[in-house]
Amino acid sequence: MHILLSKIRISNYRSIESLSLDLGMSNLLIGQNNTGKTNFLRAINTAISGATDVSESDIFVAENERLSKNKTAIIDMLFQPVDANGNIGNEFSDYWTSIFTDTWITVSPEGNFVGIRTDIKFDPFKDSYVINRRCIQQWGESIDTAAVLTKKVITTDDMRTALQAFYMDANRDIVQDIRNRKSYFGRVTSNYDLPNEKVTEIEEQLSNVNSLIINSIPMLKKTKERISVIGETVGSTSISVDIEPLARKISDINKGMDIIMKDGSAAAFPISQHGYGTRSWISFLTLAAFVENQNEKLRTDDDEAEQYIMLTMEEPEAHLHPQAQRQLFNQISQFTGQRIISTHSPSIVAQSALADAIYFSKHNGKTFAVHYKANISTLNNDEKIAREVINTRAEILFSSAIVLCEGLTEELALPIFFYEYFGYTPYALGVNFIGIGGQNYRTYLLLIKDFEIPWFIFSDGEKKTNATVKSAINAVFNLDYSTLKNIIILDNHQDYENSLINEGYSEQIIEAVCEYENNANFFEAYIIQMSKQKSKGGVDRNYTGDDGRQRALSDLLHNDKPKYSKTVAKKITSHSDKTKRIPAKIKELFVVLANQIGIQMSVSEEDRHESFD
């Protein structure tokens, strides 16, 4: 029986004022930058490893709050026994019982557990912040209701050895690790467990090789002779100086170590001459080697010994192309132990199970996180979400807000209007416009609901589309869509193209189409060419009468809807009348969006449409 960190609660740590999460064997942290994912990883690593490098910067401070020396950061961890498949059991194995002892293990009808509270607080006697780790006897519903021993209890070497945390930040680089004895690479390569006679033998050979190199290279030999007179300069005859092309002591051999890579028949190069992606990847692989080495040493004395391993890792995709990201994540998935990984890679999200995902967001400087709930899985929605959303649109999980619209036409046009209105590109603010193909609202909303991402709908007003939106909102949220301000429906049963025409943008649309086709007479030629021809509905086209040109323009736009979308939007946003640069319903959407997620205006109106591409 193994163990699992199944629950964690954090209070007043960095950007986290209050957070409680259930964890599995594999956990994927997603969300925008600067939402607190790194702080969450550091909190777990600090609590498990008992790190001592803590300070007042680790204490959460609210806006306009003055930090009190009495304020304490708290990290609660609950460990439970699990079987080989990761299923939570009732009792710890004999090995873990011997490690934790009765002092730590809480016997409960719901299953035995070990609770550890880590406090980060100011110690007036040491005049610095320190860590205390104590036993939680009753987990309770919250940090405030937990029953905690007042005595510090983590003092045994067995527990420190058995509970191990390994943290890798996004800046990992094997080139730096090679020179750092405290890195995982340095700790592996400097760990020599050899008999004394073997050490003596190797060091004699190293000394002989050094002498051979120096005596074989005239310039090295001459240089050695020259620098040997340093003793005379400083007034000492006992000083000896030598050159070491190679380390002579086995304890120093890692200092001159390097990693060489060779691709097929190409020349071999040191790892420092390879890209950051490869260097980052190898850095992780050295950690895997270090963990394997630790496990082997642990079992040397006890075949039944176990070790709890927690890997906390930032952005495994750093500097890697999408296919390499997938391969690396596959290797991470095979890592021995529990894993908590943060990522900004849609490729990695698409490769993961939805149940592993934890969405992070930040509001008013405070970090929030929520698990994917999978609470309607009986309808096989998980598979459909993975197939229709995650595999193709995983980037939406890194959004601050999502706008669902009918199709590609709106998806291409709305960002242009967004920039004209706000002065920011939508991706700069994390706003994602998604054309869902007209009928797929429900699948997207199921995912958005569980991750609590702010969402909006900009929909055509056609009766069939209205019915689809109504049905989806009712099925997912059990609400009447007409009562929701974040759903914008075009008036008078119009679709997007006809709404622009009827709002008086025909002239701008015709200019845009002619510019796109590089033919000033393109629209007039289209009317002549298409008159009397059969429409898609089998009816003769008739472009006579007062509204004939509007009908012709509507047919033109609907023949290939996305074709002119961006060109038309750019033309409208450069309208001579500034009050007409945003169509009314689109402006209504932006007003609601700004109010709900707090967007501020930027960039002068004169410059916005010129700089957007």
Image (cartoon, grey):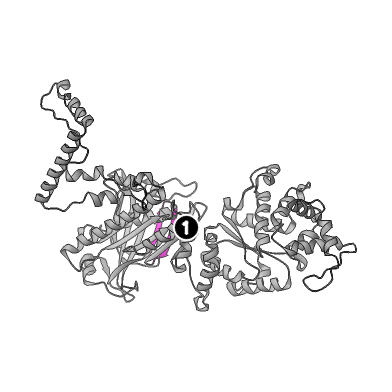
- Res 71 seen here: no
Badge 1 density bin: few <14, some 14–19, many ≥20, Cα 10 Å: some
- The spot of residue 368 in percent (x, y) is 48, 58
Residues 184 and 543: in front is: 543
Residues 597 and 177: in front is: 177
Is the magenta region chiefly helix, strand or loop? strand
- Res 516 seen here: yes
Q: Which residues are magenta?
A: 8-24
Residue 17 included in the magenta stretch of the image: yes
Q: Type of residue at label 1?
A: Pro
Q: Is 545 placed left or right of 283 in the picture? A: right
Q: Residue at x 74, y 50 (%)?
A: 571
- The spot of residue 54 in percent (x, y) is 34, 48
Q: Residue furthest front?
A: 265
Number of marks in the rendered image? 1
- The spot of residue 12 in percent (x, y) is 41, 54
Q: Residue at x 71, y 42 (%)?
A: 606
Q: Residue furthest bottom?
A: 378
Secondary structure of the residue carrying numbered label 1: helix
- The spot of residue 99 in percent (x, y) is 22, 65
Residue 539: quadrant of the picture: bottom right
Q: Residue furthest left?
A: 197
Residue 46: quadrant of the picture: bottom left
Residues 86 and 353: in front is: 353
- Is residue 441 placed above or below 34 in the rendered structure? below
- Is residue 605 placed above or below 290 in the rendered structure? above
Q: Is 197 placed left or right of 360 in the picture? A: left
Residues 571 and 481: in front is: 571
Residue 97: quadrant of the picture: bottom left
Residue bearing mark 1: 322
Dividing the image into 4 quarters, which one contains the N terminus? bottom left
Residue 367 included in the magenta stretch of the image: no
